[in-house]
Image: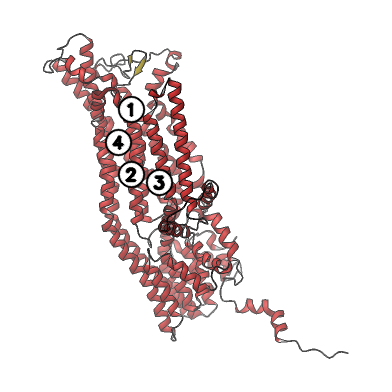
Amino acid sequence: MEPTRKPTIEEILKKHAAKIEDTIKSDSVSEKTNYSQTYTTFKQEMAPELTRFERLCRSLGSVVKLKVAQKDEDKIRKSLEIAHLDLEPWQPITLGVVSFMGVFIAGLLISVAIALFKGGFENFPFFFFILVMFAGMFLFYFINGYPARLANKWRLKASSQMMPAILYIVVYMRHTPNLEKAIAFASEHLQYPLALDFKKIFYNVQVGKFSTIKESLDNYLNTWKDYSIEFIEAFHLIESSLFEPEDAKRISTLEKALQVVLDGVYEKMLKFTHEVRSPLTNVYMLGVVLPTLGLALLPLASAMVGDIIKWYHVLILFNIIIPFFVFYLTDKVMFLRPGGYGETELLERNPLYPVYKSRKPYAKAFLICLPFFIIGLLPLIFQYTPIPGFLGLKSDYTFSEIGLGFLGDNSIFDFRAIGDRTVGPFGIGAILMGVSFTLGTALFFSIAFKRKTEKLIKEREKTKQLEVEFNNSLFQLGNRIGDGVPPELAFSKVAESTKGLKTEDFFRRVSYNIMQMGMSVESAIFDKKRGVLVYYPSSLIATSMKILVESAKKGLNIAALSLISLSEYVKNMNKITERLRDLLAEIISDMKSNMTFLAPLLSGIVIGLAAMITSILTKLDIAKLSGDSTAISGFGNLNTILSIFDMTKMIPPYILQIIVGIYLIEIVFILTGTLTVIDSGEDKLEQTNKTGINLKKAIGLYVITAVIAITSLSLLTSIVLGNLT
């Protein structure tokens, strides 16, 4: 019989490795996490717009390799790295050039075809060709600047998560002074996009770009040197805490890191509030006030200059060129905004996200607004379709025929036949009906956006209120555990002391899972089916409980200190957030009042003036047609006046009103997006919700003002000119 061989240390460790690791495991971050696969999968799921742009650049952007100046190449490469775009600097520029050339060639071919179809190059549509050139240049500008825009969007969203990121790392390192595990812990509990940044730190090491986590981290922090020095300084303080010999000194250094970020964010936002006033005023004056006041001259100008100004010229100017100009100005304003403050929650992670992405709200909103569209298009329906004939109706009526004789004998729609073509409508009735089209368009977006965001906004507000209460309850929970009460019993005691608050239900559910279901603290909170977090999708609550579970493995005192310090940190963060909100409130309030009050008020009055001018010219034209060249005393010879103002060549106020209405809607979309970025950073949910609310307010006021102005000024014109005859 062979003597029993004594097992080696290696064999013992190999045999019991799994059991030992499970026993001494002190964190939830696996050492063997495949960050290469995690990073790429996370990027594809969370940032599909990045992969779409990458595909376009690799296909169309690789047609020809353009030489890029070194300075521009460095700038573009930096933007590509920040936005996690796996591209070469020349590819986005090539895509922009190819897009411009494609639009230019298509526009040239269409213009030549139109000229040949009309009989010769003297009929070449220069205006259309110039418009195509303008569209091509805008497309080139948009694509060429898209990497920088994506990088800025990424920076705003990522920097809004800076404070939580430093908070998670600091709290984790209070009980476990391991920077690598702390960053991994933060990457697991933060949301996109900063989570992707942190995952890339490990990804770069695994793919061999850097040999150590320290090198990869330093390279990542270098991308923030032009935007957030305080973020870099905080990480350096966290790193230096590892070399502190005393535990108290180490914790003090960690706390200083968090304070550095809080102070830095506040100082930069304070500076931003002073810098942004002038650009926003320029946006409002150049993009809203001046164009609106210019509209007042359009009816007279179009009547005086005849065929030079057409309605489609005004449409292109006010619905394409000016909105693009406003977009350009606001785009520059958004690049001024520093990071560090804003909405941190990721919309795509919300359980109600399918409601936001659904197309059903648009279909329902269209059905609700369909009557408004039909009323708004009635003048065109009566004039250009056979529907009135089928119904036994005339194509037009006078006010006297429908019992509104006090408005005179003018036609409701008032189309004019000039040779083989029809112009108009010039009637007051047509203008009032056209207002319904603008109202229907605004209501369509307002109703759809409300249905898309209503539930998500309510859930967000409920979660925020819960987090405010939870912070106080967290302090109580830390004190209970600090007094020696096990976490299993501490939850029921905190539930008793928070009666009547939203957090009571949270702690009672945890206590029920532990006491009645026999679950551990970790399972009671994090179980995918029965865990309490299923009912409370809050990153703050989830992270707080994770910190509790992990720190409790090292002792009750450490767990208690972790919770109490977390409560204090969050309280300080909330104070800074409120101060920042107060700083931005005045700017946002001014711009919002301009957008939802002054702009629609001015536009409504301008439409009323256009209706009045049309009404005056209509009265004069009627007098001329009656053969009385001096029909209205005090106006001199009407033939002289009407030779200057040719009413048949002016832009119909019906069309002008629709153009102004669409212009206002576009301005509300652009300015609401800008104000949302200024206030909350990158926040699609807030932007969609606020756009719907602002549209309802702005267009509602515009419609009321326009109807009152059109009716009152037209009546005044009718009375005054009636008395002069």
Alpha carbons under labels 1 and 4: distance apart = 21 Å
Give the residue drawn at x 73%, y 83%.
Answer: 11
Task: Say whether disc 2 or disc 3 marks the residue closer to the N-terminus.
Answer: 3
Camera-side mark, 1 or 4: 1
Amino acid carrying label 3: it is: Tyr
Camera-side mark, 4 or 2: 2
Amino acid carrying label 4: it is: Tyr
548 horizontally vs 577: left or right: right
Report helix, strand or loop for mark 3.
helix
Which numbered dot is residue 702? 4
Asked if 162 appears above or below 717 in the picture, the reply is below
Quick check: marks 2 and 3 in contact, CB under 8 Å? no
Alpha carbons under labels 4 and 2: distance apart = 20 Å
Alpha carbons under labels 3 and 4: distance apart = 33 Å
Which numbered dot is residue 141? 3
The residue carrying mark 1 is 311
User: Local crowd at mark 2 within 10 Å, few (<14), some, or many (≥20)?
Assistant: many
Amino acid carrying label 1: it is: Trp
User: Local crowd at mark 4 within 10 Å, few (<14), some, or many (≥20)?
Assistant: many
Report helix, strand or loop for mark 1.
helix
